[in-house]
Image (tube, rainbow, N blue to C red):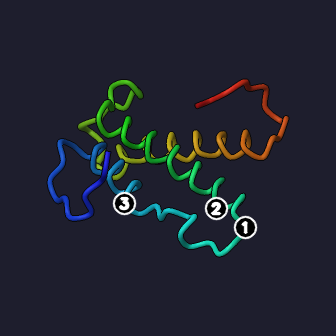
Amino acid sequence: MIFDRNQTEFKDCIQEKVWELATRQPPFERILPYADTLKSACADYYNFNQALLSDMYENPDRFGFEIDPSQPDWMNKKQVEFYFWFIGGLKILQAINMRCLPMRSIS
């Protein structure tokens, strides 16, 4: 999925937060002037995040996101942000081969 930076209408605040995260994440391999290996790793991480955000945008129910009408939108959006950064953090740990968490694969 390609996220349109000019989009202004969303189904709900969850979809809006996913869009916000996706459009604010730069493709790191374009901005880092490092070795090809690092650029490749950055491209892989960016593509993983974009795939995750696309899935979150198109299938929010699959991730268990629920909008609590008694809460303000910013509070409902926090669950998306937490999930995204938590999964992204696990992916980084996996990528640098840390053995502090017992995991096989999260992709």
Query: Which residue, given by chain and number where applicable, does mark 1 sit on?
Result: 35
Residue at (81% x, 41% y) in the render: 97
* Disc 3, SS: helix
Amino acid under label 1?
Ala
Q: Give the numbered dot on residue 78.
A: none
Q: Residue furthest left?
A: 9
The disc, 1 or 3, on the residue closer to the chain's N-terminal end is 3
Quadrant of the image occupied by residue 55: top left
Q: CA distance from mark 1 to mark 2?
A: 6 Å
Left or right: 17 in relation to 29: left
Residue at (29% x, 49% y) in the render: 73
* Disc 1, SS: loop
Amino acid under label 2?
Lys
Q: Residue furthest right?
A: 99
Which quarter of the rendered picture does the C terminus lie within? top right
* The one of 79 and 46 positioned closer to us in this rendering: 46
Q: Residues within 10 Å of mark 1 (few under 14, many from 20)?
A: few
Q: Which percent across, then down, holds residue 33?
A: 65, 75
Q: Which percent across, then down, holds residue 1?
A: 32, 44
Q: Residue furthest front?
A: 36
Left or right: 41 in relation to 24: right
Quadrant of the image occupied by residue 39: bottom right
Quadrant of the image occupied by residue 63: top left
Query: Which residue, given by chain and number where applicable, does mark 3 sit on?
Result: 23
Q: Residues within 10 Å of mark 3 (few under 14, many from 20)?
A: some
